Image (cartoon, rainbow, N blue to C red):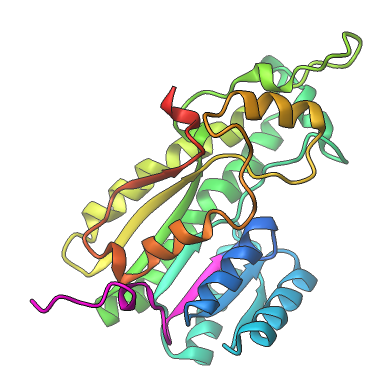
Amino acid sequence: MTRPNVWDQFKLDGRVIIITGGAGLLGREYAHALAQAGAHVVVVDINGEGVTQVAASVTQKTGVRALGIQVDVSDKTAITTMVQRTIAEFDCIDGLVNNAAIDPKFEGERAKEHTTLFEEYPLELWNQSLAVNLTGMFLCTQAVAPAMLIRGRGSIVNISSIYGLVGPDQRLYERDDPQAPKLYKPVDYVVAKSAVMGLTRYLAAYWKDKGIRVNTLTLGAVFNQHEEEFVRRYSARTPLGRMADKFEYCGALLFLLSDASSYMTGSNLVVDGGWTAW
């Protein structure tokens, strides 16, 4: 086997990669980064205006054609239509980034979810979270599989969280104000992210000889205008002493989608600032 040029292994020239949750904080960073590496990105999100804006920005800044499609990843029919449109536009699908997730901020209209005790947590919220965070991965992967099987190749990356590896440190969400309501990281998010690795291992073993690689990318927290109190506590709990910047996961994702990781499947790449090291 001829030794390849190491930089060429990271190139995605002409490849077609679907990114779910593509209008979110990290999804849009992924879209720009993968397009810079040469990929045509299909930006998928329930936010229709957002996917249009991200796709237009990617095309303008990189010169590589991108496509935005509004999709609810818990809707099987919508996903099927999205895949059909992707193939009609680009003829193939080379990669899938299962990034879409419900992870409500501690501030804003859904903040009350973080004040609910486990013993009282609503079944409706549990079902809604699992429908997007886990079933959405299942449906999207199932939908792109036929196109990848025909080509005999593909790379799928399932995005997980450090809370898929360890239980949430609920002390992070405490307030200095003793009168403030007690906050919790919801159970549904943690359970869904824990299940991601099981899905990854199953699919990697299932497609062992089909040319389709499936890996998990597990992330730590990224700064997104969090309260100073939380940033201080999170940073103190992390060996690198800070939260991630929004662009710091792009290199790891490029590695998993490219030929640079050609001998890697069923694995979990953890990028968490050392959170799970102690």
Quarter assignment of residue 229: top right
Vertical placement of residue 40 versus 188, above or below = below
**Residue 45, percent from left and from top:** 67, 65
Which of the pair 255/194 is nearer the observer?
255
Magenta highlight range? 1-19
Q: Quadrant location of the N terminus?
A: bottom left
Which of the pair 84/105 is nearer the observer?
105
* Residue shown at 57% from the left, 47% from the top: 133
**Residue 190, percent from left and from top:** 55, 32
Which of the pair 33/141 is nearer the observer?
33
Answer yes or no: is residue 77 visible.
no
* Residue shown at 67% from the left, 42% from the top: 103
Q: Is residue 31 part of the magenta span, yes or no?
A: no
Which of the pair 189/245 is nearer the observer?
245
Vertical placement of residue 248 versus 45, above or below = above
**Residue 215, percent from left and from top:** 35, 54
Vertical placement of residue 117 versus 219, above or below = above
Answer yes or no: is residue 233 visible.
yes
Q: Is residue 11 part of the magenta span, yes or no?
A: yes
Q: How many marks?
A: 0
**Residue 275, percent from left and from top:** 50, 30
